[in-house]
Each structure stands twice: as structure tokens, then as C-alpha cells.
Image: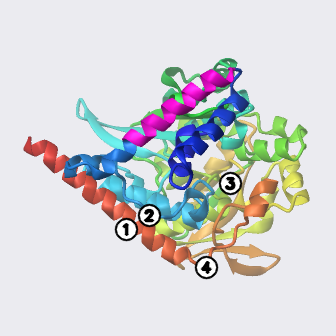
Amino acid sequence: MDIEGFVRQAIKHDSEESVRENLTQKIMEYKDIDSNQALKMASAVIEEVKHTLEIESHPDDFLRELIEYPRADVAMGQIGVGSRGAGDFFVHRKIAEIVSSSHTNAFITPEAQDDGGVVKKSVNSNDIYVTTAVDGIHSRLSEYPFLGGFHVARAALRDVCVMGADPVAVISDLHLADDGDVGKLFDFTAGVCAVSELVNVPLVAGSTLRVGGDMVLGDRLVSAVGAIGISEYPPTARKRAEVGDVILLTEGSGGGTITTTAIYHGMFDVVNETMDISFIKASEAIFNAGLLPKVHAMTDVTNGGLRGDAHEISNTTGLGLTFYDDKIRAVINPKVLEMLEKLDIDPLGVSVDSLMIIAPKNVAEEVKKVISSVNVGITEIGFVDGTGKAKLVKNGVEEELKPLFREAAYTKIKKIVGDTTPEDFELMKQKVEKAALDSIAKKDNVVRSIKEK
């Protein structure tokens, strides 16, 4: 529970005494302390929040601009941020525009909406491409730190691999709420290090803090793992796809999303299916065979499932992609596919953690051979065309493959929230657009002011 957030909201419409009384009770629900200590804590939080509200009338315009943020009046859940659908993709594009407004140089920037970012450096007259990626722990795996750490580390390394880089290091950022057991820190780190040991990529640095410091009660775990990779070759970015290319897909057993689905539906045996490193083995096989320069693009089927990835690739390249439904299902782990179908979850709308490779026909044949040689399943699932749309052929009928407003609902709470596009989605986008532009203007003003000092 965010007690600072509670006070900020409650104090607007309730008396200070009422807020103090309610907060005291809430603190005692989480902490084993007496009422006097809880009352002191509640009073301190209220006093601090009241001070922060005074800044709204502060005479220093620059200070007020620093402290206040551009409000979109659109909540994260409303527009589906983190839900890997149309709303989430839109917000990420706005974030990329803010990054691009800094006019710093990168070989692959967030605007490409690719799996990782890339900078190009010249060392002794040789070009070196440095790839970075970061992923956050699945929010529903807070109670299962080892699984959370394992899958988020694997995800970050995947994002580096699909950009054609050789992973060289992993970093970790770990936040545990005030009442969380310290053992969660160790279990999460062990999960990260299990992947680190399996693929021989060291965990070299990190940060460990509390979620919200003293202001958040409970034991929620939130964290992120980053990965760094290097390559002598240009990255296998999505924009390199060409008409006539073949689309390959490796067997996918899922990661954090599939694990969450299995746990919260009581289908625990499926969790074991996700505990592998076949994705990284497949990437390494391509790398070691010297095929990377010949492969046009690679991506992992994660954000919003194949629907989301197909849409983003088509949107980035302006090309079309045609997929065959039966061939896709053939490379989803049988136990995972059985679970998804039993729960009426669209396999094309969730993260199955497959490696998708786009390459010329002759190169694709070589790729299939080297990946099969490391005992990872792979098959041809479609091709690139010039239509500018992503399409799915199912039972002989072709349909446009579009991302939903949110990824396919894979928990009961997500089914209640739904995945239909809100009627006011266009209005929400306009508000978000304005907030992003206001943030750029604020950044420009602050940079200008500091330079003028």
C-alpha cells in the first residue's frame, strides 16, 4: 500500500483527523506496532504531504516547473500500459519521441521499437556494436522471486541475442517493499544467477532498494534486469527485413507470462516447461555458425504475442508479413498450447518466447540446420511481402493480424478488465500526445536554463 498516495488523495476530500485515523489503522494492518507508534507514523506522513502541496503556490516558476509533471489525465490501466496492446505500443512510441528529442546519437534508437538499443563505436579502426536491453519482472511473480528472476534475466538476454549481439554481462535492479522478507532478494538473485550460470554470462552490477522507501507498506517485489552484448556486425534489426524473405519460428515454451498463467490457474506442471534456455541456445547456434551477417532480422515473440510483433515489424518496415496459423501452433510447446486452448487464451496474443528469424530463403535453410543441431525445434511459418499489412492464413482463409487493445487475457482478473478498445481511445491518445510534447518542452527548458547558468 502506498501510504503517501493514500494521503494525497484522501486529504483532498476528508478532514485531516479522519485521514490520520484511517491511515493509522491501515499501518497497523501491515506492521506489528502499537497504536501510538502507528499514529506517529501517520502524522509524520500527513505533515510531509502537506508541505509538498505548498509548492503549488511557490513564487519560483522554475522550481514549480521542476516539481510538477505534465498531466495527461489518462491512467496507466486505462490506456493499457504494460498490457502489450495498441495502447501500450502508442505510449512507448511517445516515450521514444522524448528520447529522440535529446538529439544524442545511437545506431538503433527506441524509435525503432526494437528489442534492444545499439550504439556504434570505433575501436582501433574497427567498428564495434554495443547492444543493451532491459526487462522488468512479471508483476504477478512477486511471490515467486526465483521464477521472476529466472525469466526476467532470460528475457533481457534474449533481447540482446535477437539484435545479433554476443551477451557479455548482466545487471540487476531490485526493489522490495518495506515489509518484504530479505529472503526474497536472495531468491530473486539466485534466479538471475541460474540463467547467468547456464549461459556463462556474469551478473556484474546492480542496485537494491526499497519500493517507495518508508511510504509503501507490504512485500511487493519489483525489479529489472539488463543485459549488454557486443558484435562486430550491424544488428539484425527489424528494419532490415526484405520482400521475399522467409519467416522462421523456434519452439516456444513461454517465460514469465506462461508461468503466471500456469500458477494462477493451478496448472503447475506447465511451469516446468518454461525452465529452459533453448532460445539462447538457438541464438548462439546462429552466432557461432557465422550466419548473423546473412540474417535480415530477429525478434522474440513476447510483447503482445505474434500479433504485437507482426504489427510492430510491419509498422516499422512498411512491409507485409503473411503467417500460417497451423505452422505457428506446431512450434508452441504442446503442454503450453494445451493450457492456452483449455483456458481460451489466444496463443497468438501472448508471449510464448519463441525466436522469430527473417532471412532470405537459402539462408533460412542454413539457419534451420544449425538450430536443429542444438536440439531446438524450428519451422517455416510465413514470408515477407510488399502489402504493408500483417496477415494470418487460418483454415485457408486470410485475415489481417492486428494487435488487440491489450494482450490476450491470461489471468481471470485480465479477463474481467477485457481487451476491447475503449470508445474514447482516440481522445486518450490526444491527451497522452500533449503530455509527451509538454515533457519535451519541459526538458528543453531545463537544459537551456542549466546551460545558461
Magenta stretch encompasses residue 235: no
| In the image, residue 41 lies in the stretch drawn in magenta | yes
Dot 4 amino acid type = Glu
Q: Give the quadrant of the C terminus.
A: top left
Question: Residue 238: x percent and y percent?
Answer: 49, 58
Question: Answer yes or no: do the residues labelled 1 and 2 have beta carbons within 8 Å?
Answer: yes
- Left/right placement of residue 68 relative to residue 88 reads left
How packed mark 2 is, by other alpha carbons closer than 10 Å (few <14, some 14-19, many 20 or more), is: some
Q: Residue at x 51, y 28 (%)?
A: 213
Query: How dense is the environment of label 4, judged by Cα within 10 Å: few (below 14), some, or many (20 and up)?
Result: few
Q: Nearer the viewer, mark 2 or mark 4?
A: 2
Q: Secondary structure at mark 3?
A: strand
Kindly identify the amino acid type of the residue bearing the numbered disc 3: Leu
For the magenta stretch, what is the residue range? 33-51
Mark 1 or mark 4: which comes first in sequence? 4
Residue at screen point 63% across, 38% down = 21
Mark before the other along the chain sequence, 2 or 4 = 2
Give amino acid for label 1: Lys
**Image location (x, y in percent) of residue 117:** 42, 46
Q: Which residue is mark 1?
A: 434
Which residue is found at the position 90% from the left and 38% from the top? 269
Q: Residue 81's spot in the image, x, y percent?
A: 56, 57
What is the C-alpha distance between the residues marked 3 and 1?
39 Å
In terms of sequence position, does the residue under pointer 3 or pointer 4 come before the other? 3
Residue position for label 4:
423
Q: Nearer the viewer, residue 30 or 14?
A: 14
The dot on residue 249 is: 3
Query: Which percent across, then down, holds residue 4?
Result: 52, 40
Q: Which mark is residue 72?
A: 2
